[in-house]
Amino acid sequence: MKIQLNNNPEEFVGLEKVTVTELLRLKNFTFKLLVVKINNKPIGRDQYDTSVIHDGDDVLVIHLISGG
Amino acid sequence: MTFEEIRTILSGYTVGIAGAGGLGSNCAASLARVGVGKLIFADFDIVEESNLNRQYFFYDQIGMKKVEALSDNLLRINPSICLVPIDEKLTAESIAFNFGECDVIVEAFDEAEMKQMIIEAVGLYFPDKLLVSAMGLGGIGNMNEMKVNKFGNLWVCGDMNMEVGEGNPPIAPRVCVAANMQADAVVEYLIELKIRKLKDESVGLYKD
């Protein structure tokens, strides 16, 4: 499966699709405050287990940090 | 494009700014200087002495409500700007209520939780609007890491890494860079929007 993750190409060999939860685990994204979007659609925390990422998807995972 | 042409275009647009602290006050000042038509901005806080190391306020404004002090400052820069100051802490609902007429929205909060709130709210209520956020502006140095990261309708200015904290205080140089990256992103987006609109209209003209 090949996707765009934060504007960078990513390849997941041997996987056809992953849930958001699985992606976060694979990429070791352990931060508490995140913004997740799949093809510009926001995905809430309660949807991580059920939202699926497919080949060709444009995925955004931003770690939110304080300051401003 | 000359500055007069830029200013003419920007004078027809409305920008929303969520927060009038380090990011918001500096972003607002730059947008006032280049001639944005209307600014809608919100903050519940008052000016404190500790703000002066980065926020666009002055010593004699300590104790004033930030939205009031910022209004004074912006009108001194550009007396013809239209301002809508909102003296309250924003929620998802008040963002939906107040920022509907904005052509673009700037996220200028300091807390990560508030940044998450507005990104989700804009994604929900105004999915077609551009939201310009800022993340990673603490400390000193690493200027080359400051970038404008464009993710569809969410642009993030900053290095997306240097979280503000005790060892990494937010101070004028980097904060103002992030705030002005936001202002520049707004100007870039609005000019492009206008050019696209003019192209669409001229295509319509020659259709018959």
Image: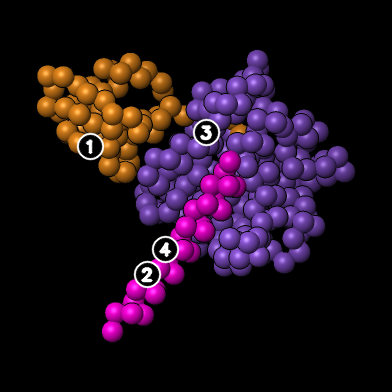
Chain colours: A orange, B purple
Which is in the foreground here, disc 2 or disc 1? 2
Residues behind callouts 4 and 3 on a single chain: yes
**Residue B196 got which mark?**
4
Secondary structure predominantly adopted by residues drawn in magenta: helix
Question: Left or right: A59 with respect to B5?
Answer: left
For this rendering, which residue is in front, A36 or B196?
Answer: B196
User: Residue B147 location, x and y as percent?
Assistant: 52, 33
User: Residue A54 location, x and y as percent?
Assistant: 17, 33
For this rendering, which residue is in front, B171 or B2?
Answer: B2
Label 1: which residue? Answer: A57
Label 3: which residue? Answer: B147
Alpha carbon of mark 4 to alpha carbon of mark 3: how far?
A: 25 Å
For this rendering, which residue is in front, B203 or B102?
Answer: B203
**Residue extending furthest bottom?**
B208
Q: Are marks 4 and 3 in contact (CB under 8 Å)?
A: no
Question: Left or right: A23 with respect to B140?
Answer: left
For this rendering, which residue is in front, B96 or A4?
Answer: A4
Identify the residue shown where x is 28% and y is 32%: A4
Identify the residue shown where x is 64% and y is 53%: B31
Residues behind callouts 3 and 1 on a single chain: no
Is residue A48 in sight in this rendering?
no
Identify the residue shown where x is 56% and y is 56%: B15
Inspect the image, locate mark 4, and give the three-letter code of the amino acid beneath it: Arg
